[in-house]
Image (cartoon, rainbow, N blue to C red):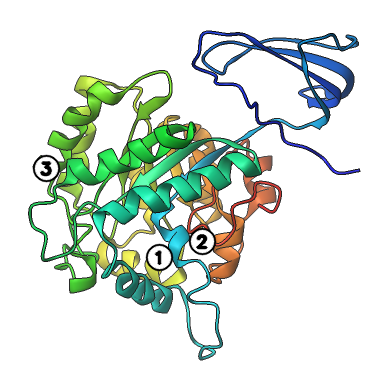
Amino acid sequence: MSMVVYTSSRSMTDGQVSELHARRALLPGGWASDVAIRIGPTGRIREVCVDVAATDGMDRVDTLLPGMPNAHSHAFQRAMAGRTEHNSPADDSFWGWREALYRFIDWLEPDDLRVIGRMAYLEMLEAGYTSVAEFHYLHRGRRREADVDCQTMAQLMLDAAQDVGIRISLLPTLYQFGGFGEKPATDGQLRFICSVNEFLDLLTQLQPRASERVALGIALHSLRAVSESGIQQVLDFRRTHDPMMPVHIHVAEQVREVEDCVTWSGQRPVEWLLRRKLIDARWCLVHATHISASEIAGIAETGAVVALCPTTEANLGDGFFPLQQFLESGGRIAVGSDSQVSISPVEE
């Protein structure tokens, strides 16, 4: 028997209350039968009752699973899915894929971003994702279009989410440099670059878009792409404006990244963050694939979430996250579709 992830055909913003009946549903305590769910006008569940007979006016499904929040997404990469699926040298890796990504975005127009975003977000809803954290770092138009600013590109992602009705946490991303030690950006990275002042202005400009269905957060692309002073300025802004604002960062996805960080600072990436006491329970560490036992314990102690993206990490040959040790230490995890090579919470 196939399992169905429910998506209502009714608008969740029309002021009505929807009622749903499932022959069986997976609840926090396990499987339950004859489950009735009342959903409020904003899409939030108001009430769940078990052993309730279906009545007229209820939408009925056979089997119901909870929706999955998508904790890490680069929506524009959905249009790249399949473009790197071919035979390559045995030593090919994430870094070769990254160069292919740079070539791909070279022809991507700003208006394409909204179209691709709609497609990716619609697929997420159909697959059972109920919200998405969009780690947004494509800040610029094509190099010949200097008039396309960071705010325009961010608004396109919000518009795409609104078009299809998915809740979104937009995470504008600070991306200053091309590598550790404030290495200048390469040509392929120029569309990502955003100064601290531009970034803080962007956060301020986006505030009016915040709503029941739009949340705003902060992303630091990675330690190789931001400076320590840049991090501090952004966290000072957060402390002043909204200390509960989430902070996401790519960290320790690749062995080479860890090695380069040690060469630059004498510390591993997560170790670097922990020693400066930057991480709290509102942080989300994306990937954290290559972490030591002390880093596992340190992350768990802070209460930070690790966003795992299994299909992307497998596709890129990243490695294996030490899941058992992390969970045994009290760590928390989330799941993300990341590069969109697959949009399926079940597959993740």
Answer yes or no: is residue 222 visible.
no
* Mark 1, other Cα within 10 Å: few <14 / some 14–19 / many ≥20: some
Label ID, residue 196: none
Q: Quadrant of the N terminus?
A: top right
Say left or right for 265 vs 182. right
* Mark 3, other Cα within 10 Å: few <14 / some 14–19 / many ≥20: some
Residue wearing tag 2? 290
- Kindly report the distance in space between the C-alpha atoms of the residues bearing marks 2 and 1: 8 Å
Q: Where's residue 213, x and y in %?
A: 43, 24
- N-terminal of the two: label 3 or label 1? 3
Indicate the amino acid at tag 2.
His
Dot 3 lies on which element?
helix
Dot 1 lies on which element?
helix
> Residue at the spot x=52%, y=45% of the render?
307
State yes or no: discs 2 and 1 in contact (Cβ < 8 Å).
yes
Dot 2 lies on which element?
loop
Residue wearing tag 1? 258
Answer yes or no: is residue 346 visible.
yes
Q: Nearer the viewer, mark 2 or mark 3?
A: 3
Residue wearing tag 3? 198
